Image (cartoon, helix red, strand yellow):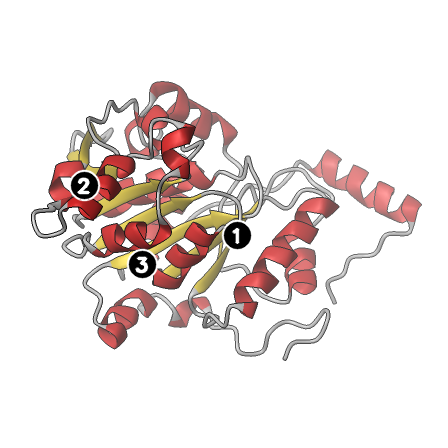
Amino acid sequence: MKGQLGLRQSATPKTQVHHAATHALQSDGRSSVIISVFSTGSGIGKTVTAINLAASLANYGHSVCLVDLDLQFGDVVNYLRLQPNRTLFDACNDYKEDKKNFHIEDYLTPYTFETAGGNEVSFDVIAPPKTIYDAYTIEVAVVEKIIKRLKNFEFVICDLSAVFSALNIAVLDLSTVVNFMGVIDFMPSVKNFKLGYDTLIAFNYPESKIRLVENRSNSQKLISGSDVERVVGAKFYYNFPNDFPSASKSIREGKPLLAVAPDSALTRGIQSLAGMYSNRPQIEIEHVGAPSIFASVVKFVKDLLGIKSLAR
């Protein structure tokens, strides 16, 4: 058991978890590494991460399927400007009607982009239902069957909604890795992040399965990452830098970061995380901290209010 503010002693160091996905495949006989991108808040960068993680893994030469499981308000299709002929709703209905003649390939929407270096990269997408009504009719057990039918892909990336729904819990159970993301910029976000992490731990998932990922880690804020680690009781597995211009350009142009901002800190960060799941050498990332003037203001405010860092 962990103390209220103590770090979990059994947390696995980064240097020992790069091969965890491969080990999971060997241990439970799966033919795909399933990575769920999950958070307990909106505006965290979950979909941007899921899309660009899929793009980076595909760029490394892996077969990848991105599944948008934010059934009511998924943004993958809009982000990539896709016009799918069939969605998860169609796949679930057809599977229930005729399992024997069901072919998952019929429900994949291919996506291809060209990197800034001129390489053509492709991955597949399973689109969410087109209407909220359709989303309500989808059965959790059938979605589980659909995901298992993706066994020919090396990586399956699941973009989940920001709630502990029955569907999300089922997919988390299936997942090899859970990328639990947060933007920790004020106290309510710390509370939500800790509550979400404690809930995942309460599900008895192994700690090596849960990867805490901080987005916008070097943005101007009063709460440090080390403070958050102390409160949550676990170390961040990865910290994405704050790179709003690159993320905005990617969304605006409807293309992954590799196509529009290949040398940006965020692009290199997501590539590095993808490399950790595919056993590749790590990319050196320069994290530029907040300006010294802002740091001085933060220190002044903390001193004025008598706020002390939680870090030892």
Label for residue 94?
2
Seen at 53% across and 63% down, the residue is: 200
Q: Is residue 17 above or below residue 148?
A: below
Which of the two labelled residues, at mark 1 and mark 3, occupies the earlier sequence position?
Answer: 1
Give me the residue at 23% from left, 45% from top.
65
Q: Which label's residue is closer to the chain start, 1 or 2?
A: 2
Secondary structure beneath disc 1? loop
Using the image as rendered, state which of residue 55 and residue 242 is in the foreground: 55
Asked if residue 102 lies left or right of residue 308, the reply is left
Query: Does the rendering let one see residue 71?
Result: no
Q: Which residue is mark 1?
A: 164
Q: Position of residue 259 (x, y in %)?
A: 28, 29
Q: In the displayed structure, does residue 146 sit left or right of residue 76?
A: left
Residue under the image location 12 percent in, 38 percent down: 106
The residue tagged 3 is 277
Depth-wise, is mark 1 or mark 3 nearer the camera? 1
Question: Of marks 3 and 2, which one's residue comes earlier in the chain?
Answer: 2
Which three-letter amino acid code belongs to the residue tagged 2? Asp
Judged from the image, the secondary structure of the residue bearing numbered disc 2 is: helix
For badge 1, the amino acid type reads Phe
Quadrant in the picture for residue 35: bottom left
Give the alpha-carbon distance from disc 1 to disc 3, as whole Å. Answer: 25 Å
